[in-house]
Amino acid sequence: MNFNDMKCFARPPKFKQRMIMMMCGVTVQGMGLSVLRAINLGTDPCSCLTQGVTNFVPLSFGTCQLLCHLVTFLFVIKYDLGMIGFGTIGNMCFLGYISDFFQWIWSLLLPAGFFETAVNRYILLLPALAVFLLGASAYMCAGLGSSPYDALPFIISAHVKKVPFKAIRMIWDCSFMAAGFLLGGDVGIVTILVAFFLGPIITWMQKKMEVLIA
């Protein structure tokens, strides 16, 4: 790999607007993730695996997610440096910690046991999932690189051209969901919905957001 030819950390047109969209997207995604973790009805497959890892190491969710991303990041570096950008760093390094931060905020603002009430959990399910997907769509739409978790399915698809990308992404998500389940991660209705429908939903939402950086 010739480092002089790589396009990582490129600054496309309207770079400032894209950076703002990426940072806001990661923040909103982290906020949505914090609620999904709190209501205990499942998280996205990547976070599910991270939760499983936290059962075995004395580290915070944010730190465990960073470490998990670093493992997949090595494969992105090896096979496609062009997938790396400011959005890669933003999502990889900060999403988990932002989620931890908002969980701390909820503990200060909301009464004890708020997220344990069945009514509250199911009322918050769809809004929290919508916020999470909105944030994920915004950070991806910014076009400043993908998280290692999101980048690897594209890399695999480029090498396994006979299999549709949607199928590869679904297999990828389901693999992380299964690994998270075996490690004791939070698998629930959200995990299943995200594993099977994340790609199409984010694609639809991204098209709606493109006007912001057009």
Image (spheres, helix red, strand yellow):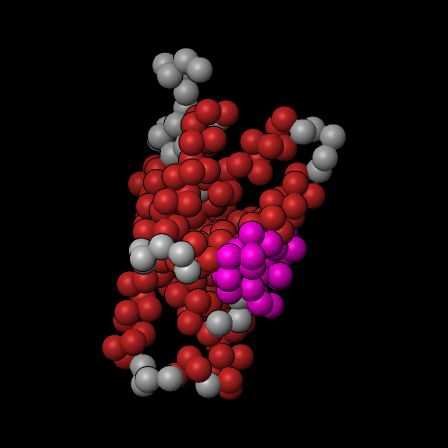
Q: Which residues are magenta?
A: 178-202
Q: Which residue is most to the front?
A: 56
Query: Residue 194's quadrant in the figure?
Result: bottom right
Rendered residue at 41%/43% (across/down): 69
Image side of residue 84 versus residue 60, left or right: right
Give me the residue at 50% from left, 37% from top: 151
Compared with residue 139, is residue 145 higher up or lower down, i.e. above or below? above
Q: Quadrant of residue 168?
A: top right
Across and down, in percent, residue 39 comes to: 46, 74
Is 9 contained in the magenta span?
no
Residue 48 visible in the picture = no
Does residue 190 sit above or below 18 in this rendering? below
Residue placed at 60% from the left, 32% from the top? 156
Q: Foreground: 19 or 146? A: 146
Q: Residue at x 42, y 45 (%)?
A: 68
Q: Nearer the viewer, residue 212 or 64?
A: 64
The picture places residue 121, in percent across and down from the top left corner, at 49, 79
111 left or right, relative to 53 = left
Indicate whether residue 193 is drawn in magenta.
yes
Residue 2, picture quadrant: top left
Secondary structure that dominates the magenta span: helix
Q: Position of residue 114 (x, y in %)?
A: 39, 83
Please give the count of numbered marks on the rendered protein: 0
